[in-house]
Amino acid sequence: MWFEQLPTMCPPATAVPPAAVFYRLTESEHPTCEDFWSHRKLNPDTKYNTDECHARAVSVFNISNGLTKLLKMERHRHKAITAIKLDKSAGLVERNGAPNHYSWWRSENFPVLQSIELTP
Amino acid sequence: MRKLKQGLVLLFYDTPQVFLAKDEVGMQYVCMIGAEDGEYGPKYACTLLSPQRTKDLIEGKIDLRSIYEFPEIPEFMSAHFIGSDDITLEAALADYTTFPKKSLPETDLFFEGFDEVAETAVEMSTTVSFVSLEVPEAKAHARIHTDTLGEFLFIFQSMVRNFSRAAARLAKKPLKKSDDSYAADVFGFAKGSFTIKFCSSHPSDMHGEHPAFTSAMEKINKFLNLSHDSKAALEYLQSVRGHTASSLIKLLIFLSEHEAAIRVEWANPSMTSSSRSKLDLLEIRRLVELCRQRSDLVVQEVVIRGRLDLAAQTAGNWKLISEEDKEVYSGEIAPDSTVSLNGAVIGDAVYEFICEEIVEVVKATGRENRRLFLKTMKKLS
């Protein structure tokens, strides 16, 4: 059902089906599937300071401005802001941290690249 | 090597990007994620921050680039997360004292809108309250006259106590005289007018809350928020009456006499943001004038059901042992009352005494003396 194997009780009960356009940083203006992989999927053996459930989610913002701070940092300076339309077939999202920040747990069959909006 | 503990996260994206951290001796750092991950995952560049710079950073008064370009102490640490508690980092001194230009964040990366009170509640795992008094002497520096501070602390504790007692009475579980579960501790002071940080003196429940303190803070803020409308404020005082109303009015009089506006923020760990209220001096003075015309607000009626231990009609004194809380209550016959203790049965009968309770504050010590004046009595059994 999920794109990645999730621990029990994950996603949390506070997560809800999305129905909006969200924004994520991608390595270039031509996103690849890997741009939407979680840190855990990209680096299975790395220590992250978050629980395993959230380590298997990807961050998205519901406004593109939410990502502009990140673009000022060396790690993200080269990246592009990509818009993606998420609906209930996309999985579940939970608002947490900053006001416009969401953690997204992606469902297995969600066509991520086909859901990208051309103009962010 | 130093061990750092992650604190407030200022920017999160898949993993913390920028956050505050403290070392083993409580020194504050800001840490920023690097361009590349290391063997242990993301690598962070951390640098020391003074309390003032920390405040400026989280209030959006200084950008992140300035912190790294012009550090207060030219020393940087390279850190990564270790261990299983998710918040411990191992940090080693970096071999540079000027932060590499290519790794500096761009200008104007500001953070703002952080709720220090809510964050503190989570950090301390208890209900906390920050009260700022805008006294004249705090205009330029974080200072306050000792007498003013002492008087305010007494009034604050008295308000919390009276709200807690009123809530307990309403729930038909009156607090015993020895019960001080409402007691608050001061755990810090901060700049910005004169801010006093309170938390409960007692351990929190399993949710990190302290019901007596939380309930009192809710009601204090409700009153302050209503106080922008005089009519609503008086209606609220009328609804709580007695000692609770009296302690709120004492707070207003104190603020008026010390020319101090007030701002109260409180939170418990389950709140996503703190509850806030404030009142300016003009509003305070307007309310004080209205309250001075309403002596009825501070009269507290007390009903005690119990057995007589003493009844002296000539001296006008009595002692009653409560059937409810087993406490001994003593008092006098109210001067305007026609009640008579002649023929009252000691020990064997249960009486209901309706009294007026007056609280007198001994100015020198701040102690409260409660006096009960018997208005009416009836024999129940």
Image (cartoon, coloured by chain):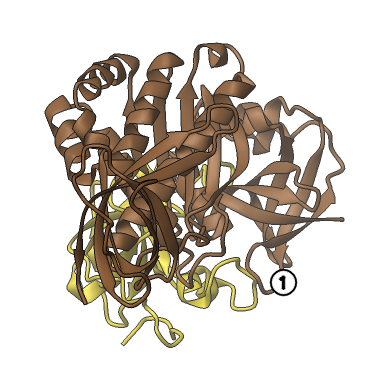
Chain colours: A yellow, B brown
| Towards the viewer: B135 or B234 | B234
Q: Residue B105, image x and y in percent?
A: 59, 35
Residue B168: where, in percent of width, then height? 34, 62
Residue where numbered disc 1 is placed: B83
Viewed as shown, does residue B23 lie left or right of B334?
right
- Residue visible at 45% across and 49% down? B118
Residue sitting at x 32%, y 69%: B306
* Residue pictured at 57% horizontal, 55% vertical: B201
Residue B183 in view here: yes
Query: Crowding at label 1, few (<14), some or many (≥20) Cα neighbours within 10 Å?
Result: few
Residue B10 seen anywhere in this rendered image of the structure:
no
- Residue B10 vs A9, above or below: the answer is above
Instruction: Compare residues B14 and B21 and report the one nearer the observer.
Output: B21
Q: Residue at x 50, y 30 (%)?
A: B152
User: Going by the image, does B214 lie left or right of B289?
Assistant: right
Q: Is residue B56 left or right of residue B218?
A: right
* Chain of the residue where label 1 is placed in the rendered structure: B
Q: Is residue B348 above or below residue B357?
A: below
Position of the N terminus of chain A by quadrant = bottom left
Kind of residue indicated by mark 1? Gly
Instruction: From this view, report whether residue B165 is shown above or below residue B137.
Output: below
